[in-house]
């Protein structure tokens, strides 16, 4: 398992992103929303949500927000299975 922390400044929105690892997110601080595929999910402190494998996600912070996440990315990398698509590139 790999763990990650992201700080999203107030008003910040990520570029569209997708990867082969399914990722579980926990909201540590703040609030905002995430568009996962064609659905939008609003979140706040202590909420949890999942981005399935190869689903496009965009995170938007309403105020400064901190997201903790974990996934099986390290295993996929070792097996040369992991792929990503950043903003449709």
Image (cartoon, rainbow, N blue to C red):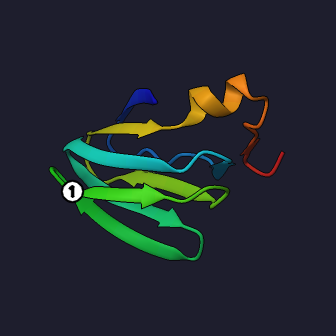
The quarter of the picture where residue 8 lies is top left
Q: Check the image and name the residue furthest to the right.
A: 89
Percent of width and height locating residue 79: 74, 29
Q: Residues within 10 Å of mark 1 (few under 14, many from 20)?
A: some
Residue at horizontal 37 percent and vertical 70 percent from the top: 41
Residue at horizontal 46 percent and vertical 30 percent from the top: 1
- Per the image, the residue denoted by label 1 is 47
Under tag 1, what secondary structure?
A: loop
Residue at horizontal 32 percent and vertical 42 percent from the top: 10
Task: Please say if 80 is above or below 56.
Answer: above
Q: Quadrant of the C terminus?
A: top right
Classify residue 5 as left or right of residue 75: left
Percent of width and height locating residue 60: 42, 53
81, 23: nearer the viewer: 81
Classify residue 75 as left or right of residue 33: right
Percent of width and height locating residue 49: 35, 59
């Amino acid at each position: 398992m790999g763990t990650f922390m992201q700080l999203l400044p107030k008003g910040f929105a990520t570029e569209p992103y997708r990867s082969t690892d399914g990722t579980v997110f926990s909201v540590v601080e703040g609030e905002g929303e995430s568009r996962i595929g064609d659905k939008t999910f609003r979140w706040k402190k202590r909420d949890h949500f999942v981005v399935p494998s190869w689903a496009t996600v965009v995170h938007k912070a309403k105020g400064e927000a901190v997201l903790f996440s974990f996934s099986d990315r390290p295993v996929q990398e070792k097996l040369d299975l992991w792929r990503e698509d950043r903003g449709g590139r």
